[in-house]
Amino acid sequence: MSAIPARPPRDLRLDVLRGWMQVSIFVSHVVGTWLAWGIHAAWGLSDSSEMFILLSGMTLGSVFSLKAAKAGAGVAQRDLLGRALRLYRTHLLVFFIFAAMVLLAEMLFQVPGAVARFGWQHLVEHPFQAVALAFTGLFQPDFMGTLPVFVLGMLLLGPFLMLVPRFGAWALLPSLLLYAAVNLGWIATPGLGGTLIAFDPLAWQFLYLLGGFLGWRALHGMTLPRSSMVTLLAALVVVLGFGVRLVQHGFVEGADWIPGLFEHKDVLAPPRLLHALALAWLVAMLVPRRADWMEGLAGRALATIGRNSLRVFCTGLFLAWIISRAMEAVPERAQLVGLLLILPSIAALWTVALFSERARGAAVATGRA
């Protein structure tokens, strides 16, 4: 029993951070809103996607490692496969409900060209084939490319973490080489049904597994070493990202190649990866695990959203698409309409998180009873 690592205390800052990222993702999905200037993605090379995948890998890496230590690797692997299957089912459910929403928007609410504009044309023209392609996760109309990356990450995480105790950080080498091959253009995941891959899983798997490795280390008491030099370098990367954004937004002059640093999110281009890791380092080193502001209303709301990220994310996809179409319908008052719809929608996402948390608590209590 002494060899079993202790469950680490819940890190409130991670819940708050995940909550902020969910709000940021929702706002970023609303096309054209000025509120997007207020999220961190507007001022750096990376956005919430990178950080969320890293944190998801860290969380499940810790969960898998603890379960493997207590009950064996087989039990931990079955638990992880069960989680992946549930997430896969969620993706399919969101996919088909979203498809129905887009089709109805064009047919009943006269949203011009909604089916073609947002990548659902193949479903209309070849419905049976498109339904079959949906099960592969590679038919990706707008907003449908995120969850498949997490599913693949979960499938790879268990076998990867079984190698870590023997090989340590070297277990990441195949993942890193695969990531490099994608960014060099040697291989790529094909999009099906005339769509493009939003997040190439062959590249993004590296960030997920890196998170899993960090989660395994944290569970075994191997926290990140404090280094003033690394902190300084991370801060310089973040400042550089801010400067690049200023050039891209036209606030200062700069070389023509600078905006290109923002391209290739689909393959997690190295500048984005470096920026995301720099941000993660600074949060880990500079933000305390608990602070008074985290206990306030805003902090508690964000933490609740963060603990219930999946349902909040899925709900946010639908709300963001509807708000974008509402803004599109009244271009002369788009910003006002967006503001009047986005702020209540954030409150709605918090409500979804609250009900999800209460439902989970009730289910746990019933199970114990």
Image (cartoon, grey):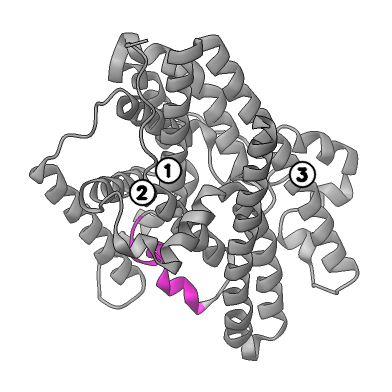
- The amino acid beneath tag 3 is Leu
Label 2's element? helix
Dominant secondary structure of the residues highlighted in magenta in the image: helix
| 2 or 3: mark nearer the eye | 3
Residue position marked by numbered label 2 in the rendering: 272
- Report the residue at 80% width, 72% height from top: 111
Q: Position of residue 41 (x, y in %)?
A: 40, 62
Position of 149 relative to 238 (above/below): above
Position of 159 relative to 112 (above/below): above
Residue position marked by numbered label 1 in the rendering: 268
Hey, which quadrant is residue 317 in on the image?
bottom right
Q: Where is residue 330 in the image (x, y as percent from the top left)?
A: 69, 86
Residue position marked by numbered label 3 in the rendering: 93
Q: Earlier in the sequence, mark 1 or mark 3?
A: 3
Residue extent of the magenta highlight = 34-45
Hey, which quadrant is residue 364 in on the image?
top right
Q: Left or right? Give the position of 263 relative to 75.
A: left
- The amino acid beneath tag 1 is Leu
Q: Where is residue 290 in the image (x, y as percent from the top left)?
A: 30, 53
Q: Position of residue 16 (x, y in %)?
A: 42, 55
